[in-house]
């Protein structure tokens, strides 16, 4: 028995050592789109409408990282590699980071803090309504992502963070209604989201 426990402990230690590179690597990879965006902006490579480019790229990465965050649990169950759970919070916070950049681009460079026009956009344009709603719902999730808030909220924390499924759905529909012609990319995101939600529904039912 002691030998078995020792073997399990050694295997866990080896896994932990191998996973040390995971967080720094994911951190740098998540930061890379922002660095490339800044480089393109400084070198004037964003074309005739840089505001539109910034908005699209930050929005794309918000949705990609959000879906990647949702995929961590299925990937962990399929692969059995528990270190994946260590990067889930980081991915969620990077999702909020790019969502904030996306919103600030609209607020500052597109609307120039014209609150009256912003309010009209929210009411009249469904894709703006959904995008604004998903960003607002992301705020409490980002604010309660610390260890201290997890302890304070207890079992309510998990219930609160289940809003991420609503946020992802709103984000996909925001993209679908934004795009007027080529729907291939938003439909890919919609398919991925459906697959992730379907997997969770299946796991819940199997329990």
Image (spheres, grey):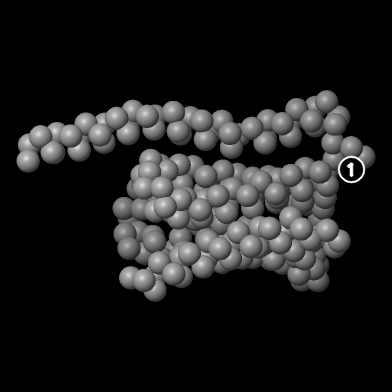
Is residue 194 depicted above or below 107 in this figure? below
Residue 114: which quarter of the image? bottom right
Residue at (76, 69) in percent of width and height:
126
Percent coordinates x, y for residue 75 in the rendering: 46, 50
Q: Secondary structure at mark 1?
A: loop
Residue at (65, 63) in percent of width and height:
190
Q: In the depicted view, which residue is nearer to us: 151 or 65?
A: 65
The residue where tag 1 is placed is: 49
Percent coordinates x, y for residue 5 in the rendering: 13, 38
Percent coordinates x, y for residue 136 in the rendering: 60, 60
Residue 84: which quarter of the image? top left
Q: Does residue 178 appear to the left or right of 188 in the view shown?
A: right
Residue at (74, 44) in percent of width and height:
57
Q: Residue furthest right?
A: 48
Q: Does residue 194 appear to the left or right of 119 in the view shown?
A: left
Is residue 22 depicted above or below 95 in this figure? above
Say which quadrant the N terminus sits in.
Answer: top left
Residue 89 visible in the shown view: no
Q: In the depicted view, which residue is nearer to us: 190 or 161?
A: 190
Q: Residue furthest bottom?
A: 205
Residue 197 visible in the shown view: yes
Q: In the depicted view, which residue is nearer to us: 205 or 106?
A: 205
Q: Residues within 10 Å of mark 1 (few under 14, many from 20)?
A: few
């Amino acid at each position: 028995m002691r030998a078995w426990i020792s073997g399990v402990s050694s295997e866990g230690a080896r896994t932990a050592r191998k996973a040390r590179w995971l967080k720094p690597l994911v951190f740098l990879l998540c930061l890379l789109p922002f660095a490339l965006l800044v480089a393109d902006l400084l070198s004037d490579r964003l074309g005739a409408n840089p505001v539109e480019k910034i908005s699209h790229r930050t929005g794309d990465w918000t949705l990609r990282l959000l879906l990647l965050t949702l995929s961590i649990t299925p990937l962990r169950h399929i692969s059995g590699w528990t270190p994946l759970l260590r990067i889930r919070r980081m991915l969620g916070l990077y999702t909020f980071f790019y969502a904030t950049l996306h919103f600030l681009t609209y607020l500052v460079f597109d609307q120039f803090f014209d609150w009256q026009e912003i309010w009209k956009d929210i009411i009249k344009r469904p894709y703006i309504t959904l995008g604004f709603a998903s960003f607002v719902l992301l705020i409490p999730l980002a604010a309660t992502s610390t260890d201290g808030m997890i302890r304070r909220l207890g079992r309510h924390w998990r219930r609160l963070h289940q809003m991420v499924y609503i946020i992802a759905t709103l984000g996909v529909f925001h993209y679908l209604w934004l795009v007027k012609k080529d729907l291939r990319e938003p439909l890919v995101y919609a398919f991925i989201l459906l697959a992730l939600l379907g997997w969770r529904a299946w796991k819940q039912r199997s329990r």
